[in-house]
Image: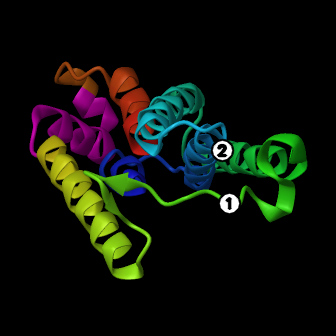
Amino acid sequence: MGLNLTVGYAGQKSQGHAAFFGIGAYTVAIVMKAGLSFWLGLPLAMAGCFAVGLALGFPALRVQAIYLAFATLGFNTAVWLVLRNEEWLTGGTFGINGIARPSRFGVSLDGALAYYYFVLGMALVLGGLLFGLLRSPWGKAFTALRDNPIRAESLGINIQAYTLLSFAIGAV
């Protein structure tokens, strides 16, 4: 969904979204390995991915098209190398294991079916939020940015702000 927002609606050529998945997943895993709750790690991971996405959006203000794709691909490779080589933090190529599945309202999500419905519910909630965002004035600004940035800017849309927002929101 985030890649669809950044690439599909805002028209930015990003190849770095796998890095955001890794940053978010490892953030939650490290928080849970430290003995804290999944429900504390999730907003921390979202905030971290938002901040990293915002930082990655700054090159998009200076470079476009294939150059932006290469810059985001380089970022993706750098994150992959850090996650693979920093074994003290991420477990290296073996990853972080031994993490329990989250529970919600006292209901264990250890079974495959219960976990499936949990993930399905989360996907529906996030899909609904994205649907609402795309039907808002922000969504129209993202579409205008993709279709014709010069026209969007002449209509008063701050294309720099919406470019940064597309990367930041798409990273979450």
Q: Earlier in the sequence, mark 1 or mark 2?
A: 2
Which numbered marker is on residue 98? 1
Q: Residue furthest bottom?
A: 113
Which image quarter holds the C terminus?
top left
- Provide the residue designation for mark 2: 33
Q: Amino acid at mark 1?
A: Gly
Image point 78% across, 48% down: which residue? 90
Residue 132 appears at what percent x and percent y?
Answer: 12, 45
Image point 37% across, 30% down: which residue? 165
Which numbered marker is on residue 164? none
In magenta segment, residue 78: no
Q: Secondary structure at mark 1?
A: loop
Q: Is there a contact, CB below 8 Å, between mark 1 and mark 2?
A: yes
Residue 142 appears at what percent x and percent y?
Answer: 26, 40
Q: Nearer the viewer, residue 65 or 96?
A: 96
Q: Is residue 81 left or right of residue 59?
A: right
Q: Is residue 25 left or right of residue 117?
A: right
Q: Amino acid at mark 2?
A: Lys
Q: Quadrant of residue 102?
A: bottom left
- Point out the stretch of residues depicted in magenta: 135-152
